[in-house]
């Protein structure tokens, strides 16, 4: 696994080095697994089977900078980690994804704006390069999300706990470096946009508040609305509390166990049984 930190460094970790435990276990702090510096934290993980020249690591920073580096550039691990992107002026890495050179990228800001562009507008560059402008941010705004466009909807949410699903086709493709279009209204009721991710019908999400409250819900329960709207309530917050993040979660519900099938020529070793 490639482990990317908020300071733009990348570390390597073998999957078997991760502690195996039940879902209720606390796990082991990442600082005990990787040589992280004080204040450094891991904010993106990429599972990698092989390093090749046909795939790229696409990165985005809080200041709206993006960068694309060949996956093969990360094939030689070092115990102390290496620089993945050169960060300036207290900038931080906020999103990382693997692409094949043919994908479209969407960036979402805390000001509720989103920009969509083809990744070939970002030439690939070496590990220590700083990158190029992906989105032009307003005063006091940050980039909060990097999305590799696929199918489904964009789920956006505000600090006050409001959000919505918006069809991906409502976001037109433009050149990178602009201000983008409205993805979620940042009104007095809503506050700033704090999260955006791509979701499909049937998936589940976890809403996380500033006080540690977790609310789990299905994507299907969230209204589908156009871009220039405020959304609906996703989570009820107490005074002084705010929504800080949203994450997709795998269903933990299990039905009746079925007998394991005999492995065939196309069976993937170690693949989990399909969930219901």
Image: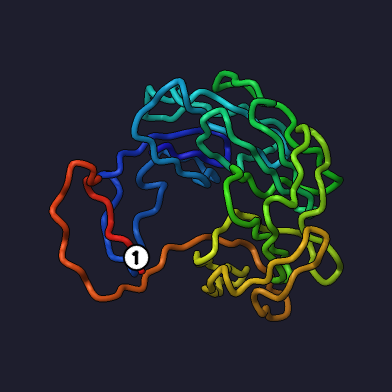
**In percent of the image, x 13 and y 54: which residue is there?**
262
Quadrant of residue 259 within the rendered picture: bottom left
Q: Badge 1 local density, few (<14 within 10 Å), some, or many (20+)?
A: few
Determine whether, in the image, residue 161 is placed left or right of residue 20: right
For this rendering, which residue is in front, 213 or 258?
258
Q: Position of residue 274 (x, y in %)?
A: 32, 61
* 54 up-or-down from 26: above or below: above
Residue that badge 1 annotates:
275
Q: Where is residue 72 in the image (x, y as percent from the top left)?
A: 43, 22
Which secondary structure, mark 1? Answer: loop
**In percent of the image, x 60 and y 21: which residue is there?**
124
Quadrant of residue 222 within the rendered picture: bottom right
- Label total for image: 1
Q: Where is residue 104 in the image (x, y as percent from the top left)?
A: 63, 37
**In percent of the image, x 33 and y 66: which residue is there?**
23
Determine whether, in the image, residue 76 is placed left or right of residue 124: left
* 198 up-or-down from 77: above or below: below
**In percent of the image, x 51 and y 60: which residue is there?**
248
């Amino acid at each position: 696994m490639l482990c990317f930190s908020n300071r733009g460094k990348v570390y390597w970790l073998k999957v078997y080095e991760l502690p195996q435990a039940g879902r209720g276990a606390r796990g082991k702090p990442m600082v005990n697994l990787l040589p992280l510096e004080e204040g450094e934290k891991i904010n993106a993980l990429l599972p990698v089977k092989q390093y090749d020249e046909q795939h790229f690591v696409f990165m985005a920073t809080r200041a709206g900078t993006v960068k694309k580096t060949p996956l093969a550039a990360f094939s030689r691990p070092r115990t102390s980690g290496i620089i993945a992107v050169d960060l300036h002026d207290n900038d931080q890495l906020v999103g990382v994804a693997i692409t094949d050179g043919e994908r479209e990228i969407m960036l979402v800001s805390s000001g509720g704006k989103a920009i969509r562009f083809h990744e070939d507008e970002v030439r690939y560059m070496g590990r220590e390069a700083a990158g190029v402008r992906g989105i032009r941010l307003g005063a006091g705004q940050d980039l909060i999300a990097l999305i590799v466009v696929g199918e489904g909807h964009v789920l956006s949410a505000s600090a006050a706990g409001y959000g919505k699903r918006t069809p991906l086709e409502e976001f037109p493709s433009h050149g990178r470096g602009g201000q983008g279009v409205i993805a979620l209204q940042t009104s007095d009721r809503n506050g700033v946009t704090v999260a955006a991710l791509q979701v499909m019908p049937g998936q589940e999400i976890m809403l996380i508040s500033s006080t540690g409250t977790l609310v789990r819900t299905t994507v299907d329960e969230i209204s589908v609305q156009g871009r220039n709207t405020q959304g609906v309530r996703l989570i009820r917050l107490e005074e002084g509390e705010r929504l800080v993040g949203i994450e997709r979660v795998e269903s933990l519900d299990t039905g009746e166990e079925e007998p394991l099938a005999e492995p065939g020529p196309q069976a993937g070793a170690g693949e989990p049984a399909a969930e219901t």
